[in-house]
Image (cartoon, rainbow, N blue to C red):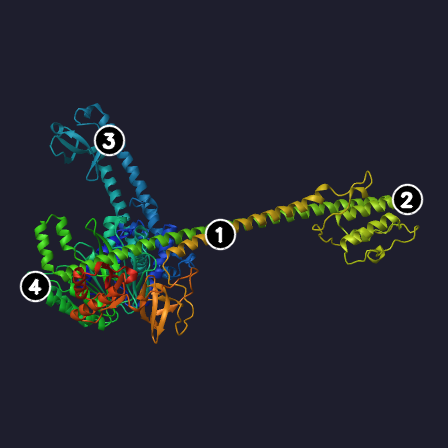
């Protein structure tokens, strides 16, 4: 990447901001070393790794390099045979723990993080080394007794000796013979030996060896002769302990050296993961997206923000949106100073660099960027006194370096193109550079103040204008970028706001010339039209959002109603099945009771045949009410009128296809002779599966029952219809609510359609255009009625105006409901439209004078004069002429639908 472009785009400053989110110095360094990818595949792979890191960041699993210390120098020292200090060994121990935990987690969650899981192969578990380090060292770096058996023994012996010395000295300082000699009664250590503080004046009287003295000299620290031998033994034991500690540290350092390469790889992988997590944290804190990278070369920024401005101002940064797609590859941004042109240029370049490096960018979803080989930039004042370069020369020097690299996979960003020299020559040079870069397929964005470059951009295919917005009321920039229109410097407005004398302002406008003033006026009108279109768009968007919200509410309500309906249906069906089961149970109980009673009658030699018949009729009636036909087939009682009638009733109710006079024998077993009653030993008929017939009405009347009969409970006759009635009510309620919401949605759609501009409803073109045909005149954007036609020319009545136009400018439309009555005045022979386009001023004024005379003789009230927009010279001449013409009552520029600035409408006296 070009170092100059990298510096002026401030890419390294963005990396420094991201690096602050790293938890480990190697991870921070890895962020600072990020470069744009060499291939599209590499950039996309980086994006995919970052997506996995974003999931890790969001899950907050606590893996990675958090809390680690840089141990690269320690690894190098171990490889060179140096004995590492406990702090270095602990740092390496923490590295082994992080490698083990991170590698295990990524391998266990390989489906969620496949790319990072592949990198986890470089994160092994250093089990032996980890165990050795943390068994030998405490968290504060002290070598533990458990580091080796010999160290434990040496420390035990040392502690015993020290205790004996301490005990002897404690007795000595409490002795009355020495109390007056001591500065204070305590035992301390100097140079590894136990001593007591003795006053200087008693130095010769105290039996001992001077080891040290205080800074003032008033106190000497002496080791009593009585413990000298024990002190020597303590000293020797301490040296032995230190030697063993050194041996332990050397042994651990050897283990580190043996696995130094694996530890280095693990450190690099953890640094890579730490850098990814730093990017993820930055993305979440700023609100970034991963843009779409393509080979097609389309550049589409959606509300992109400059990363450094976001860091400084947070949410107050005004986003920009740019579009370089299709044939448009070059953008010329113009506008006032401090209006945001350079920031827009830097934002475009910086966001592109971040995307090429696989980084998240501060923009919205939908941002698309081309994959490029180079991003070149020339931004800011790079004049150099040391190199004797002016501003213009420094810019030109950088541009000369850029031109050989121009190509389809190159982006070029130029600030203040053509500045620093004569405006005419600067404009010519700027246009030549834009042509060169555009012809070579570059994606080019430039800023400038030169009006000639604005005109060049508007007239050249593939080059588009853009403006930084300026509030004409507050005279302050809004920093928004408006595509498709050139910007203005607004120097005079800003000068007036800052207090420049009016006389100076007036003279400045005079020096600008009429042409410049007219151009500024046109730009004012264009901005007003754009503002009106934006307001309309906002209204339409609000209506669309409201319609969308209403649609969602309708769908949610309908889904809720459907869910509730299904739940109620399920509950009703479940209750119905429970009721039917209970009813069948009662019927089976009655059947068993009947059989028992019938068997009893049989055993009694059938003393009461009438009782059996009554019981059969009772059971048949109960079965009819329970709607259980199959159980009727199990009855084989003696024939009786009551039972036959019950069976016929069941047949009529449940077998409507049976003839009215059919006998029960056709549908159920015919009972045997009167004496053939079932005995107690006969098996009961099989009870097959019963069909659910809860949907059939119960037609049994109370008159058919005798007193004392027990049939099905009342609930079995009523609760199933009630449940279905509740279901019907719920269906009806859902249909009513759906119709209401649908009506509201249709009404809101009609309101949006009324607000949105749309072309008229066209019918099929008919040729020739016959008088009375309803047509749409594209030139005026209005509808009219054909009066007459001659060849390819058609005379059309548009409102109160008659015009002649070509057939190609007309489209037949469906006629309106109201009847248009054509005026019968002979004024139709004179056209109300005067077309002066393509004429010189003299020719146009001559034609205009002639047409005004014709219109006056025809008693026309209004004329439309078409002079076009162009440079405005013809319009100015026409305006001056109309001001002095005696037949003209008033004149004005046309409305947008009449032709705007290209038409002047005249009302005649």
Mark 1: secondary structure: helix
Disc 3 from disc 4: Cα separation:
84 Å
Find out whether the residues at labels 2 and 4 contact each other: C-beta distance under 8 Å.
no
Nearest the camera: 678 or 116? Answer: 678
Earlier in the chain: of badge 1 and badge 2, it is 2
Label number found at residue 389: 4
Question: For this view, does 797 lie left or right of residue 723?
Answer: left
Task: Estimate the spatial distance between the alpha carbons at disc 2 and disc 4, rounded to whole Å.
Answer: 134 Å
Mark in the foreground, 1 or 4: 1
Q: Quadrant of the C terminus?
A: bottom left
Mark 2 and mark 4 lie on one chain; the one further toward the N terminus is 4
Please tell me how crowded label 3 is: few (under 14), some (14-19), or many (20+) other residues with Cα within 10 Å: many
- Residue 367, given in percent of the width and then of the height, sits at 32, 60
Tell me the distance, in whole angstroms, between the alpha carbons under discs 2 and 3: 128 Å
- Which residue is drawn at the image coordinates 92% and 50% (left, top)? 674
Taking depth in this image into account, of 402 and 32 the one nearest to the observer is: 402
Q: Quadrant of the N terminus?
A: bottom left
Compute the Cα span from label 1 to label 4: 73 Å
At a point 18% along the width and 68% down the height, the residue shown is 845
The residue pinned by badge 2 equals 610
Pointer 4: residues within 10 angstroms few (<14), some, or many (20+)? some
Q: Is residue 387 left or right of residue 346?
A: left
Residue under label 1 = 743
Q: Nearer the viewer, residue 780 or 329?
A: 780
Q: Which residue is mark 3?
A: 169
**What distance separates the C-alpha of mark 1 from that of mark 2?**
69 Å
The label nearer to you, 1 versus 2, is: 1
SS at mark 2 in the image: helix
Callout 3 secondary element = helix
Q: Nearer the viewer, mark 2 or mark 4?
A: 2
Q: Up-down: is 712 above or below 660?
A: above
């Amino acid at each position: 990447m070009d170092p100059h472009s990298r510096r002026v785009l401030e890419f390294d400053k963005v990396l420094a901001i991201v690096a602050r989110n790293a938890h480990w110095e190697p991870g921070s360094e890895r962020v600072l070393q990020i470069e744009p990818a060499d291939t599209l595949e590499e950039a996309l792979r980086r994006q995919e790794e970052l997506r996995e890191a974003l999931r890790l960041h969001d899950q907050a699993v606590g893996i990675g390099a958090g809390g680690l210390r840089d141990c690269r120098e320690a690894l190098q020292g171990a490889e060179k045979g140096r004995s590492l200090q406990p702090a270095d060994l602990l740092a390496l121990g923490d590295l082994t723990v992080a490698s083990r935990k991170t590698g295990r987690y990524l391998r266990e969650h390989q489906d969620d993080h496949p790319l990072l899981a592949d990198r986890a192969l470089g994160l092994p578990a250093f089990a032996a080394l980890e165990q050795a380090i943390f068994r030998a060292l405490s968290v504060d770096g002290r070598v533990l007794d458990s580091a080796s058996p010999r160290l434990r023994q040496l420390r035990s012996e040392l502690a015993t000796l020290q205790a004996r010395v301490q005990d002897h000295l404690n007795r000595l300082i409490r002795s009355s013979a020495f109390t007056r000699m001591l500065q204070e009664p305590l035992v301390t250590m100097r140079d590894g030996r136990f001593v007591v503080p003795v006053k200087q004046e008693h130095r010769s009287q105290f039996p001992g060896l001077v080891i040290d003295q205080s800074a003032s000299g008033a106190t000497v620290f002496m080791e009593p002769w009585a413990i000298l031998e024990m002190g020597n033994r303590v000293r020797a034991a301490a040296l032995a302990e230190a030697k063993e500690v050194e041996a332990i540290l050397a042994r651990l350092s050897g283990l580190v050296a043996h696995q130094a390469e694996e530890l280095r790889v693990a450190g690099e992988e953890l640094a890579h993961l730490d850098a990814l997590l730093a990017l993820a944290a930055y993305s979440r804190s700023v609100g970034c997206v991963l843009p779409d990278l393509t080979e097609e070369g389309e550049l589409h920024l959606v509300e992109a923000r400059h990363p450094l401005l976001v860091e400084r101002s947070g949410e107050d940064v005004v986003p920009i949106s740019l579009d370089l797609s299709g044939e448009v590859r070059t953008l010329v941004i113009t506008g006032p100073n401090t209006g945001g042109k350079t920031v827009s240029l830097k934002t475009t370049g910086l966001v592109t660099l971040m995307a090429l490096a696989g980084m998240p960018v501060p923009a919205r979803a939908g941002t698309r960027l081309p994959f490029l080989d180079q991003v070149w930039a020339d931004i800011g004042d790079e004049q150099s006194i040391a190199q004797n370069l002016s501003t213009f020369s420094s810019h030109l020097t950088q541009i000369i370096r850029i031109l050989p690299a121009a190509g389809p996979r190159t982006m070029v960003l130029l600030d203040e193109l053509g500045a620093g020299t004569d405006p005419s020559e600067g404009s010519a040079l700027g246009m030549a550079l834009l042509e060169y870069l555009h012809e070579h397929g570059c994606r080019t964005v430039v800023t400038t103040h030169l009006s000639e470059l604005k005109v060049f951009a508007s007239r050249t295919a593939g080059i588009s204008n853009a403006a930084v917005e300026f509030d004409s009321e507050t005279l302050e920039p809004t920093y928004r970028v408006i595509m498709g229109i050139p910007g203005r410097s607004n120097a005079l407005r800003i000068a007036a706001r800052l207090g420049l004398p009016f006389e100076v302002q007036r003279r400045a406008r005079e020096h600008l010339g009429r042409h410049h003033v007219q151009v500024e006026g046109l730009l004012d009108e264009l901005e007003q039209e754009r503002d009106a279109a934006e307001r309309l768009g906002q209204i339409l968007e609000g209506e669309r959002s409201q319609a969308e919200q209403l649609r969602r509410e309708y769908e949610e309500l309908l889904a809720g109603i459907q869910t509730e309906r299904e739940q109620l249906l399920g509950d009703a069906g479940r209750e119905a099945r429970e009721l039917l089961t209970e009813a069948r149970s009662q019927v089976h109980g009655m059947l068993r009771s009947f059989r028992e009673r019938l068997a009893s009658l049989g055993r009694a030699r059938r003393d009461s045949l009438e009782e059996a018949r009554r019981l059969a009729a009772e059971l048949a009636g109960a079965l009819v009410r329970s709607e259980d036909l199959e159980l009727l087939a199990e009855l084989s009682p003696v024939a009786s009128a009551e039972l036959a009638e019950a069976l016929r009733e069941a047949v009529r109710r449940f077998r409507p296809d049976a003839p009215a006079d059919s006998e029960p024998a056709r549908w159920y077993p015919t009972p045997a002779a009167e004496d053939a009653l079932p005995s107690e030993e006969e098996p009961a008929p099989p009870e097959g599966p019963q069909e659910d017939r809860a949907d059939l009405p119960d037609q049994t009347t109370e008159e058919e029952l005798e007193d004392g009969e027990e049939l099905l409970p009342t609930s079995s006759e009523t609760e199933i219809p009630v449940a279905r009635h509740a279901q019907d009510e719920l269906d009806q309620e859902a249909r009513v609510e759906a119709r209401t919401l649908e009506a509201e949605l249709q009404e809101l759609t009609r309101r949006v359609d009324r607000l949105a501009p749309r072309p008229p409803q066209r019918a099929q073109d008919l040729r020739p255009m016959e008088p009375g045909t309803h047509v749409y005149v594209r030139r005026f954007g209005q509808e009219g009625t054909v009066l007459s036609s001659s060849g390819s020319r058609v005379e059309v009545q548009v409102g109160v105006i008659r015009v002649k136009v070509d057939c190609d400018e007309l489209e037949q439309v469906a006629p309106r409901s109201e009847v248009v009555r054509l005026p019968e005045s002979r004024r139709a022979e004179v056209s109300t439209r005067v077309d002066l386009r393509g004429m010189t001023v003299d020719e146009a004024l001559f034609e205009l004078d002639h047409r005004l005379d014709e219109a006056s003789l025809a008693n026309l009230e209004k004329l439309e004069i078409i002079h076009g927009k162009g440079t405005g010279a013809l319009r100015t001449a026409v305006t001056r002429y109309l001001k002095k013409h005696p037949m003209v009552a008033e004149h004005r520029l046309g409305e947008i639908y009449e032709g705007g600035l290209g038409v002047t409408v005249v009302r005649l006296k």
